[in-house]
Image (cartoon, rainbow, N blue to C red):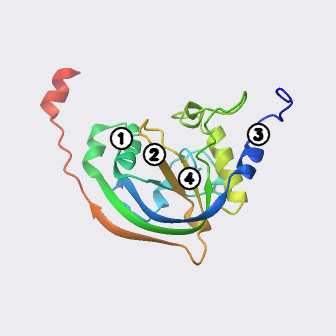
Amino acid sequence: MSTGGSPAWTVRAAVANCSVRPWLGEAWRCHTRKWPGDNADGSLKATGRYHRGRDRYPESETWPALYTGLAEHIALGESLRHTQHLPGLAWKRVTRLEISLEAVLDGTGLGDGDFPGTPVLDDLCRPADYDLTHEIARAARARGAEALLVPTCTRFTGNNLIIFPDLLRSGSSLIVSSAEDPDLYIDWDELRSTT
């Protein structure tokens, strides 16, 4: 269906119009201490915004993703918005990665809502409805992208870099340059008194 002479928006057409280019820089992850900062194995356990895990999909329909923010506060914000249990905060790690990728799909305009039918950022940030973002990830992967650059859902200004480690090319690299375990204190007495 067309709107005002323009073809209807589709994920396939939108992703086909995104540029794919090399990317070099730093990114941060806020993740559980169980996994090294450059390891996406945990993503295969539970489905997320741009990946499919074994909790909802058969093995043949899963793919891993390494979620990073292009600023430390973005990585922290993305992690916090998915924290369901406060004790989990005590086991977080912040890792800085030096990244060099040969093929990154720039999806930063996918949620700009430019014309009717185009998704807006809220469509890309639904906490449990991943149909649209999975379709975007599948289309990016089909184009041979090693990663996807997308707007953050934290409401901070900035972007996330979603890396597909199973698609990394031989000339690409992820190097852990630092990792810190923040001391996130939880006052249990205060928490109990407010609930």
Q: Amino acid at mark 2?
A: Gly
Residue 25 screen position, x and y as percent: 45, 64
Q: Which residue is mark 4?
A: 149
User: CA gap, disc 1 to disc 2?
Assistant: 16 Å
The residue closer to the viewer here, 9 or 40, is 9
* Disc on the earlier residue, 3 or 1: 3
The residue closer to the viewer here, 39 or 5, is 5
Q: Secondary structure at mark 3?
A: loop
Q: Callout 3: few (<14), some (14-19), or many (20+) C-alpha neighbours within 10 Å?
A: few
The residue closer to the viewer here, 72 or 157, is 157
Q: Which residue is mark 3?
A: 10
Residue shown at the point (64%, 45%) measured from the top left: 134
Horizontal side, residue 190 vs residue 17: left or right: left
Tell whether label 1 touches label 4 (CB within 8 Å). Answer: no
For the C terminus, the quadrant is top left
Horizontal side, residue 150 vs residue 69: left or right: right
Residue 131 screen position, x and y as percent: 65, 39
Residue 104 screen position, x and y as percent: 60, 60
User: CA gap, disc 4 to disc 1?
Assistant: 20 Å
Q: Is residue 150 above or below residue 20?
A: above
Q: Which residue is mark 2?
A: 158
Q: Callout 1: few (<14), some (14-19), or many (20+) C-alpha neighbours within 10 Å?
A: some
Q: Secondary structure at mark 2?
A: loop
* Disc on the earlier residue, 4 or 1: 1
* Disc on the earlier residue, 4 or 3: 3
Tell whether label 4 touches label 2 (CB within 8 Å). Answer: no
Q: Amino acid at mark 4?
A: Leu
Q: Which residue is mark 1?
A: 80
